C-alpha cells in the first residue's frame, strides 16, 4: 500500500509505503505502485498517525461476555484508531496463574482484530512462577483498593509482588486509591455525586505515595493507572513513576454527573472541575506520560441502578483518540502531543520497540483521519457491545482507515473519504477486517523475513490456582 501526501503529526507532508507488516519508506514523492493490485490511498489534506496503543482495557472475557467480547471490543478499538490493547486481569477467572492466562490468550488470538497484551494479576492465590513464564505484558493493574472482581490487596502482598516483578524487569501497573482516606459520611447520600464524595481525591495521592515507597525500595518500574488528580500525577513524577490519564478524567468532571447520573460512576471517580482542569494542563504540558482509556463496559441495565449498586466503569476505547484529535483540531493540544500520549510514549514506557512511530522498519500500525471531519459522538454509532458512551453529544474526529501491521482492520466510506467503497457495496458506510491481532509479547521479529514467529518458551508450568472472580465492579 502507498499512502500519498499524508500530513504527519509534526506537520511534514510525506508518502508512506507499506510492505507486508512494516513501513518500508517515509519519503517525499515516492513512485506510484506498478502493480494494479497494489493499493493506493490519496491522503491529501489528511492526517496520518501511528495507531493508538491503549494500555488499559477491560474486554470482559472470560466471564462477562454479555458486557464485551474480544471481537466486539477490538472492533470498537479499530474504529477508534486503536491498534493495540492491553487487557487487565479482573475477569472470571482472574488472570493470576498459567491456566487462566492461557485461556484468555487463546480467546484473544481467535477474536481480536488488533494486537494485544495480557496483564497478570495479583491476589492471595496468584501463581507468579507460572505467570512470569508466560508472555505477560505487565503485572497489574494491582488494586490497592477494591474494584471489579474484589482484587484489592494489602501492603505486604503488594510489596512481595513488586519485589518479584522487579527481579524480572516487569512493569507493575498500580490502581492507586487508599481506602483509609475514603469518606464514610458520604455513604448516607444517594445522589449521583456521592461516589465522588466517598472515594476522595486525597485517597489517590496517599496511595501513589505509599506505592512509590515500595517501588523505591525495590528499584521497580511502577506505572500509575488512571491518575485523576493533579496531586496524584505530581507525586508519581516526583518519584520517577510513569502515569496515565483517562479521557473521562480529562474531559468530564463532577459537574457532568447531573446528566450522567450512575452512568458516570467509575474508579477512581470524577473530580471537581478545578482538578480536572489542572489534570488537563499536565496532559498538555508533557507531565503526564500516556493516555489510556480504562475501557470498562457494563450494560445499560446494570448501570441503571442506585449509586451504591451500579457497577463502576465506562466504555472509552473507541472515543479516546477522536476526542484528542478534536482537541487538536481546536488548538487545545498539538498533534505531536497526541501522538506521544497515545503511541510513542506508550511504546517507550512498555518497551514495544517496533510500535508507536511512523518510520521505516516500524510496524505498519497506522490511522488516517480527516482533521476537518468533526462528528457528534453517539452511542448508537459506536461498536462496543454495551452501546452507550459517557461522551454522548461531544465531538470527535474518527478514523477513515486503520491498519494493524499492514492489514486493513477498519475503513469508513463517504463522499469526502480517501477510501474507495469499491467492492464494499453501494450502501456500505464502513468495513472491518479479519481477526489478525497477536500477543505483542509472544512474537519476535525475524531479521530474514520481517514477519512474526510465535515464542512458545515457558509453557511448561500449567499450574491452576484460579479462584472465583467475585462480583463485577470495575
Image (cartoon, rainbow, N blue to C red):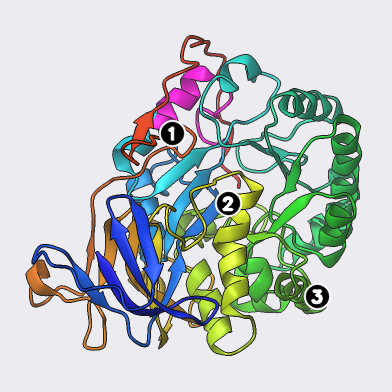
* Residue tagged 3: 278
Q: Is residue 103 magenta?
A: yes
| Mark sitting on residue 223 | none
- Please state if 414 lies on the left or on the right of 139 as rendered: left
Q: Is residue 2 above or below residue 344?
A: below
What residue sits 66% from the left and 35% below the top? 150
The answer to which of marks 1 and 2 sits earlier in the sequence is 2
Question: With 328 as the anchor, is 272 left or right in this view?
Answer: right
For residue 347, the mark is 2
Instruction: Tell me how many marks there are.
Output: 3
Span colored in magenta: 89-105
Note whether 54 is above or below 370 in the view shown.
Answer: above
Q: Secondary structure at mark 1?
A: strand
Q: CA distance from mark 1 to mark 2?
A: 16 Å
Q: Is residue 55 above or below residue 412?
A: above
Q: Which residue is mark 1?
A: 444
Crowding at mark 2 (Cα within 10 Å: few <14, some 14-19, many 20+): many
Q: Residue at x 56, y 78 (%)?
A: 335
In the image, which is nearer the foreground, mark 2 or mark 3?
2
Amino acid at each position: 500500500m502507498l499512502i500519498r501526501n499524508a500530513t504527519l503529526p509534526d506537520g511534514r507532508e510525506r508518502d508512506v509505503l507499506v510492505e507486508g507488516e512494516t513501513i518500508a519508506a517515509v519519503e517525499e514523492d515516492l513512485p506510484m505502485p506498478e502493480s494494479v493490485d497494489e493499493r493506493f490511498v490519496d491522503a491529501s489534506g489528511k492526517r496520518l498517525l501511528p495507531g493508538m496503543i491503549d494500555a488499559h482495557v477491560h474486554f470482559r472475557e472470560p466471564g462477562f461476555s454479555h458486557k464485551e467480547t474480544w471481537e466486539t471490543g477490538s472492533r470498537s478499538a479499530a474504529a477508534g484508531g486503536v491498534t493495540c490493547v492491553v487487557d487487565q486481569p479482573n475477569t472470571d477467572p482472574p488472570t493470576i496463574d498459567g491456566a487462566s492466562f492461557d485461556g484468555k490468550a487463546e480467546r484473544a488470538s481467535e477474536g481480536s482484530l488488533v494486537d494485544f497484551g495480557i496483564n497478570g494479576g495479583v491476589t492471595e492465590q496468584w501463581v507468579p512462577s507460572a505467570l512470569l513464564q508466560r508472555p505477560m505484558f505487565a503485572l497489574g493493574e494491582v488494586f490497592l483498593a477494591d474494584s471489579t472482581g474484589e482484587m484489592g490487596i494489602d501492603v505486604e502482598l503488594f510489596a512481595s509482588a513488586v519485589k518479584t516483578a522487579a527481579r524480572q524487569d516487569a512493569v507493575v501497573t498500580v490502581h492507586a486509591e487508599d481506602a483509609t482516606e475514603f469518606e464514610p459520611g458520604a455513604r448516607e447520600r444517594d445522589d449521583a455525586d456521592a461516589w465522588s464524595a466517598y472515594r476522595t481525591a486525597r485517597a489517590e495521592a496517599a496511595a501513589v505515595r505509599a506505592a512509590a515507597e515500595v517501588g523505591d525500595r525495590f528499584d521497580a518500574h511502577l506505572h500509575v493507572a488512571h491518575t485523576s488528580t493533579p496531586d496524584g500525577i505530581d507525586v508519581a513524577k516526583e518519584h520517577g513513576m510513569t502515569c496515565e490519564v483517562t479521557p473521562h478524567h480529562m474531559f468530564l468532571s463532577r459537574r457532568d454527573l447531573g446528566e450522567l447520573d450512575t452512568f458516570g460512576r467509575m474508579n477512581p471517580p470524577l473530580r471537581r472541575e478545578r482538578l480536572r482542569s489542572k489534570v488537563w494542563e499536565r496532559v498538555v504540558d508533557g507531565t503526564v506520560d500516556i493516555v489510556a482509556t480504562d475501557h470498562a463496559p457494563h450494560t445499560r441495565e446494570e448501570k441503571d441502578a442506585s449509586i451504591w449498586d451500579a457497577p463502576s466503569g465506562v466504555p472509552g476505547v473507541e472515543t479516546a483518540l477522536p476526542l484528542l484529535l478534536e482537541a487538536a483540531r481546536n488548538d487545545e493540544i498539538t498533534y505531536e502531543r497526541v501522538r506521544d500520549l497515545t503511541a510513542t510514549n506508550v511504546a517507550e514506557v512498555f518497551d514495544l520497540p517496533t510500535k508507536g512511530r511512523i518510520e521505516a522498519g516500524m510496524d505498519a500500525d497506522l490511522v488516517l483521519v480527516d482533521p476537518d471531519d468533526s462528528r457528534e459522538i453517539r452511542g448508537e454509532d459506536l461498536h462496543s457491545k454495551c452501546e452507550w458512551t459517557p461522551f454522548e453529544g461531544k465531538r470527535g474526529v474518527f478514523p477513515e482507515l486503520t491498519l494493524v501491521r499492514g492489514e486493513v482492520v477498519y475503513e469508513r466510506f463517504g463522499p469526502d473519504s480517501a477510501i474507495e467503497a469499491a467492492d464494499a457495496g453501494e450502501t456500505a458506510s464502513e468495513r472491518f477486517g479479519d481477526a489478525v491481532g497477536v500477543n505483542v509479547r509472544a512474537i519476535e521479529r525475524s531479521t530474514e523475513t520481517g514477519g512474526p514467529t510465535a515464542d512458545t518458551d515457558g509453557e511448561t508450568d500449567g499450574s491452576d490456582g484460579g479462584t472465583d472472580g467475585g462480583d463485577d465492579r470495575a
